[in-house]
Image: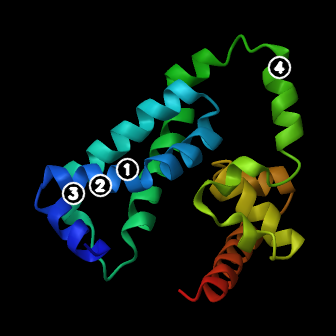
Amino acid sequence: MNLEQLVLEFQQKDVKAYEKLYNMYCNSIFGVVNNIVKNDDVAQEITQDVFIKAWKNSTSYSAKKGRFFTWILNIARNAAIDYTRSKKYKQSKQNLNSDFFVDILETSKSLDNSTDTIGIKEFVTKLGDKCKRIIELIYFKGFTQKEASEELEMPIGTIKTRNRNCIGELRIMLGV
């Protein structure tokens, strides 16, 4: 069965189509979410919530606007970022142990292996250093453009322009 047919059946609330799409994408979605929230249990919960939300809002997906995976990936990314901005998350981070900070220091320097959960690391590494850093912060670490601006000490307009240009370069590489 082709993906278009599977997505159509998913939109028509076919449980078997849901299960197939979940099995196809759950590991990738989990990887992206976990890269943002840095907690396996929370990432698993968010991943399940993402698929339920996609199920409930399946009619809002349109193949004309992009691929199904991209659509569900955006739902996941937004859900993970929303979680990191929640009161519950902030309270859970009040008493962090030093291991968490060591991990932040080690992984904040460059794209790590866990960012390859959707197979895009190969393409991102071909981008220039400026693009790599912006893509890493905004898409893999869940920074807002404003936060990336502050982190990189660049004007927000520059971040927005470079982000748009970098995504354009990735699209060219991917033939999208």
Q: Amino acid at mark 1?
A: Asn
In three-dimensional space, the C-alpha distance between marks 4 and 2, rounded to whole angstroms, equals: 37 Å
Residue displayed at 51% across by 43% down: 30
Mark positioned earlier in the residue sequence (4 or 2): 2
Q: Amino acid at mark 4?
A: Asp
Residue 159 x, y percent position in the rendering: 74, 68
Of tags 4 and 3, which is closer to the observer?
3
Tell me, yes or no, whether the two marked residues, 2 and 1, touch with CB atoms within 8 Å. Answer: yes
User: Is residue 25 depicted above or below 62 in this figure?
Assistant: above
Task: Name the quadrant containing residue 25.
Answer: bottom left
Q: Amino acid at mark 3?
A: Ala
Name the residue tied to disc 1. Answer: 23
Residue furthest out toward the front = 1
Element assignment for label 2: helix
Mark positioned earlier in the residue sequence (4 or 3): 3
Name the residue tied to disc 3. Answer: 17
Of tags 4 and 2, which is closer to the observer?
2
User: Is residue 81 depicted above or below 133 in this figure?
Assistant: above
Label at residue 20: 2
Element assignment for label 1: helix
Name the residue tied to disc 4. Answer: 99
